[in-house]
Amino acid sequence: MCLAVPMELVEHNGFRGVARLGGVSREINLLLVPDVKIGDYVIIHAGCAISVLSRDEAQKTIDLLRGVDDFKDLGRA
């Protein structure tokens, strides 16, 4: 099973960027979301941002993930 998670884009350099959720930062590929801006929330799957979503939708998903034992320590978005 694969899982895609929402993260906030905090750095942008062409088609590469850095996204953060809580205390976790990841380098990501932005090729599929060329109009993304710093501060946007993106769905990350296998190191790639696959779509942009609103802050509200990202928070709803993060709240749901916190209900799963492996994600209990996720920081606030």
Image: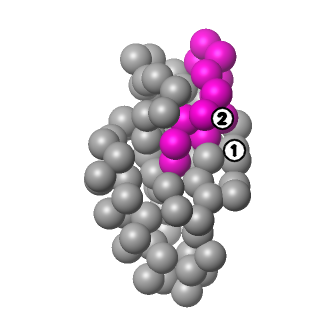
Q: Position of residue 54 (x, y in %)?
A: 30, 42
Q: In which quarter of the view is residue 67 placed? A: bottom left
For the residue marked with disc 2, what is the amino acid? Val
Name the residue located 38 percent from the left edge and 37 percent from the top edge: 51
Tell which residue pokes out farthest to the front in this image: 76
31, above or below 55, in the image: above
Mark 2, residue position: 18
Name the residue located 65 percent from the left edge and 16 percent from the top edge: 13
Q: Is residue 10 visible?
A: yes
60, above or below 24, in the image: below
Please state the extent of the stretch shown in magenta in the rendering: 7-19
Name the residue located 50 percent from the left edge and 55 percent from the top edge: 77
Could you tell me how many numbered marks the image carries?
2
- Asked if residue 10 lies in the magenta stretch, the reply is yes
Which is nearer the eye, 39 or 31? 39
Which is nearer the eye, 46 or 33? 33
User: Mark 2 to mark 1: distance in Å?
Assistant: 5 Å
Mark 1, residue position: 26
- Asked if residue 40 lies in the magenta stretch, the reply is no
Mark 2 Cα within 10 Å, few/some/many (few <14, many 20+)? some
- Tell me, yes or no, whether the two marked residues, 2 and 1, touch with CB atoms within 8 Å: yes
Which is nearer the eye, 39 or 6? 39
Tell which residue pokes out farthest to the top in this image: 14
Lower sequence index among marks 2 and 1: 2
* Picture disc at residue 45: none
For the residue marked with disc 1, what is the amino acid? Arg
The secondary element bearing badge 2 is classed as strand
